[in-house]
Image (cartoon, helix red, strand yellow):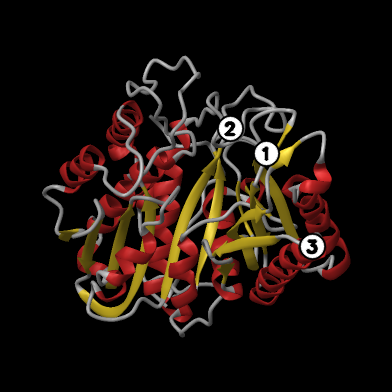
Amino acid sequence: MSTLASPATTTGVTAADSAPAEAGSAPVVPDDSGFRAAVPDHADDLIALRRAVHRRPEIGLHLPQTQAAVLQALDGLPLEVTTGRSLSSVVAVLRGGRPGPVVLLRGDMDALPVTELTGLEYASEVDGAMHACGHDLHVAMLVGAARLLCGVRDRLPGSVIFMFQPGEEGPGGAEPMIAEGLLEAAGEHPVAAYCIHVLSAIEPYGRFSTRRGPMLAAADTLKVTVRGAGGHGSAPQFAKDPIPAACEMVTALQTFVTRSIDVFDPAVITVGSFHAGTAENVIPAQAEFAATLRSFSPATRERVRQGVLDVVHGIAAAHGLTADADYIPGYPVTMNDGGEAEFAASTAAELFGDDRFAWMANPKAGAEDMSYVLEQVPGAFVFLSACPPGLDPMTAPLNHAPEARHDDAVVPDGAVLLAELAWRRLSR
């Protein structure tokens, strides 16, 4: 399958352009990488890999079939390959033929507990599991980038770490991979890290997008149990009803956001679960609810953490009740380095044309555990729309929907961009 049509570009430079480049400036490339010319030789295999992974989705940290598919796809390449001890990760290191720094490229591999409703010929064959977020495309893109970069190994000035990660959708695979030595896999800390995430909607087919600074939100969880004393519904004065207090907490959390959080450094609180009672004439002894908390800076994240606990405990005390409030930290803010975001943007636009790239005006409130890598390595998280041509991206099913479809014709272009980012960053 051929790549998406776009204007021809050249990635090489002359000897006069050989001065070192600053982050975010035009990269210095000693020779044309040739990745766009080489990728058609791999395209059919990459599409086949994506569809094979799509048919057999696996959830969480343990993905034995997906891991085996990745290992088979990398077999025969000049890579140093290791697998995770506590999870089904794959880390592959390519050592270039010339000295230089280290760059990390990441692709996540896990699926979601969703029953697929796309009707595709290669739809999930596993009940209750689906690659609804496009991680199957990420696997194929990263394998493609590895193959392209292995093709220029002798000229490659440095090393590349290929990070095949399980558990992004939960409970999180990046942290245990880092704990198992991911960032030291090539012998020294990476100078940059990049990843691509596909979208099934919102942006038109084939468009790359990113932004400087916060890209995705921190996502934390609040679980609350309000404790009172049960009784008969006809005589609430002899009980301590937790339901009104819990309801007041839910509404007060929304007021807390609008009255305590800077509108230009926002937070989102959504209570998605509320449980209390068993019958209409029984006052229960407790009520429970759970909320997701999203924020876009460490300062606001801390303000939200302290504020929601104060709201819950204060309202409980006002009603003569007690409350257990469990604040559970999740993924931190996914923060793009400004210079690396500029570099990724200019590379995408140069390779595929200005019409194939757009800056994002605002971050998205989704969360990603690539954030743990970007806390330690400057880098860029890039979106690529795989919304099928012919669908309106503004009404197409979103990632995570059972009807979500990702057109895998974008896989070769994703592989090219990942490979090119590593090549140019190492070639400075």
Inspect the image, locate mark 2, and give the three-letter code of the amino acid beneath it.
Cys
Q: In this view, does 382 lie above or below 158?
A: above
Disc 3 crowd, CA 10 A, few/some/many (<14, 14-19, 20+): some
Q: Name the residue under label 3.
A: 315
Q: Give the percent coordinates (x, y) of residue 199.
A: 56, 40
- In the rendered image, which quarter is residue 82 located in? bottom left
Q: Is residue 12 visible?
A: no
| Residue nearer the viewer, 13 or 376 | 376
Q: Is residue 55 above or below residue 383?
A: above
Query: Is the residue under label 1 in contact with that under label 2 (CB below 8 Å)?
Result: yes
Residue 41 lies left or right of residue 370; in this view the side is left
Find numbered disc 1 in the image and state the secondary structure of the residue it sits on.
loop
Sequence-earlier tag: 2 or 3: 3
* Residue 82 vs residue 175, the one in the foreground: 175
Crowding around mark 2 (Cα neighbors within 10 Å: few <14, some 14 to 19, many 20+) is many
Secondary structure of residue under mark 2? loop
Q: Name the residue under label 1.
A: 202
Question: For mark 2, what is the residue?
Answer: 387
Can you give x and y, in whole percent of width and height, for residue 80 in the image? 15, 63
Q: What's under tag 1, amino acid-wise?
A: Ile
Q: Which residue is drawn at 53% across and 82% down?
A: 22
The location of residue 303, given as percent across then percent down, is: 71, 74
Q: Earlier in the sequence, mark 1 or mark 3?
A: 1
